[in-house]
Amino acid sequence: MSAQRLHQSFIDAWHGLKYVFNTEQNFRIQVIASLFALGASIYFPLHAWEVVLIILLIVMVLTMELLNTALEKFSDLLKPRLHHYVGVIKDIMAGAVLLTSLAALLVGLIIFLPHFIGLFK
């Protein structure tokens, strides 16, 4: 593997992230929520394992959204008229993103809620 190929693979990955950020509203919302979570992780005195868990959940949610977008774009090539399962597949992927996001939200509440309550005492 050459350094030029490796460099190009990073450029391609950056283009993919930029494309999804520019075209997918949900991804932008998730990035903003991630920045708030990271900011809260810095502000509040969390254990190292809590910060690691938050980072992993952020990566999981954003990765699921990237996979969802990729599958949607691929499915759009097939056109829904070819098979009714195209819509079902898109719904399943959206459900996977929703489930991952809700789990991340729940864990975030468990970790951060005591700290936010402490601010108002």
Image (cartoon, rainbow, N blue to C red):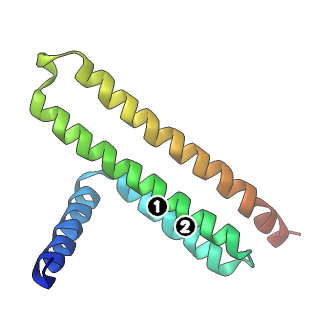
Residue 41 numbered tag: none
Amino acid type for the residue under numbered disc 1: Val
Q: Quadrant of the C terminus?
A: bottom right
Whether label 2 touches label 1, CB < 8 Å? yes
Which residue is located at x 44 percent, y 42 percent? 97
Percent coordinates x, y for residue 45 in the rendering: 75, 79
Amino acid type for the residue under numbered disc 2: Ile
Vertical position of residue 66 compared to residue 34: above or below? above
The residue wearing badge 2 is: 55
Percent coordinates x, y for residue 17 in the rendering: 26, 63
Vertical position of residue 20 compared to residue 38: above or below? above
Vertical position of residue 7 compared to residue 71: above or below? below
Pointer 2: residues within 10 angstroms few (<14), some, or many (20+)?
A: some
Which residue is located at x 67 percent, y 80 percent? 43
Which residue is located at x 39 percent, y 36 percent? 94
**Residue at the outermost right position:** 121
Within the image, what quadrant is residue 85 found in? top left
Percent coordinates x, y for residue 12 in the rendering: 16, 67
Image position of 21 (left or right of 120): left
Image position of 62 (left or right of 38): left
Image position of 65 (left or right of 47): left
User: What whole-number distance in Å separates the C-alpha atoms at marks 2 and 1?
Assistant: 6 Å
Vertical position of residue 68 compared to residue 66: above or below? above
Residue 59 numbered tag: 1
